[in-house]
Amino acid sequence: MVPLYVLWNAPADQQGSLMDKGLTTRNVMQSVVAHIQENDVYSPTVILLEERNRQKNINPNAKWSVYRELLFLSLTACGAENIDVDAFDKEYRRAYKRLFESKNFSDLLCLEDKNPPARAVYCRRTFDTPTLQPRLPQYLVTTFS
C-alpha cells in the first residue's frame, strides 16, 4: 500500500496506472481533501473505509489505518499550517464513535483506525506535529516513468 500523502504528489498524467495497480485514485483523494477543507471529518472517513474495503477485494493483505491516512493526506494536501491536529483528532474521535455505533460501517473498522492513545498525543504536543516527506519515493518514480 502506497500512502495517500505520497500518491497525492504523483504526476497527474499517471493516474491511470494508479487505478490499474488498485491504488487510490486522484478523484477519491480530491473528494477527501474537499471534505477536510469544509471541516468535515466524518464523510472522508467513510470514503476511506470504503476505499480500503475495495482494495481488500483486490489484495486481501492490504492493511492501513484510516486515521493515519486521513491525517497525513490532510497535512500534505492542505498544508500543515492549515490543519489543527488537536481539532482534527477531536472531530475524528466523534466520526469514529459514530461509525463504530453504525450497523453499516462498524464491520469495516479495525483496531488501526482508532485515534492514537493519550501518550502518543502527549509526545506529539511535546515534540511537534508530524512532518512528512512530500516527494515520491524512488521506487515510485521509476514506476511512474
Image (cartoon, rainbow, N blue to C red):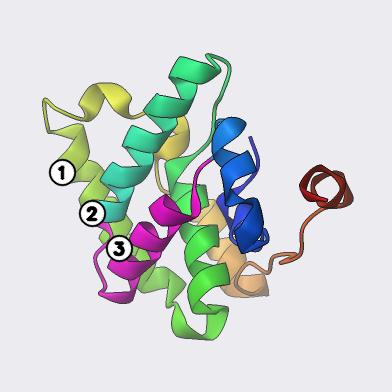
Pick whichever, 74 or 98, lies toward us.
74
Mark 3: give few (<14), some (14-19) or many (20+) Cα within 10 Å.
few
Disc 3 to disc 1, C-alpha distance:
13 Å
Say what secondary structure mark 3 lies in: helix
Residue type at numbered disc 1: Arg
**Magenta stretch bounds:** 24-42
**Which residue does the image show at 43% across and 32% down from the upper left?**
52
Cα separation, mark 2 vs mark 3, equals: 11 Å
The picture places residue 106, in percent across and down from the top left corner, at: 22, 27
Look at mark 3 in the image and give the residue it sits on: 90
Badge 2 marks a residue whose secondary structure is: helix
Is residue 93 rendered to the left or right of residue 58? Answer: left
| Nearer to us: label 3 or label 1 | 1
Q: Note whether 62 is above or below 140 in the view shown.
A: above
Residue underneath mark 2: 42
Q: As shown in the figure, which amino acid type bears the numbered disc 3?
A: Lys
Residue type at the position of mark 2: Tyr
Q: Which mark is residue 98?
A: 1
User: Which of the two marks, 2 or 3, is nearer to us in this view?
Assistant: 2
Secondary structure type for disc 1: helix
Q: Principal SS element in the magenta part?
A: helix
Classify 81 as above or below 107.
Answer: below
Residue 66 % position (x, y): 43, 43
In this view of the protein, which residue sits in the foreground, 124 or 58? 58
Marks 3 and 1, the one that precedes in the sequence = 3
Does the magenta-highlighted stretch encompass residue 46? no
Residue 88 seen in this snapshot: yes
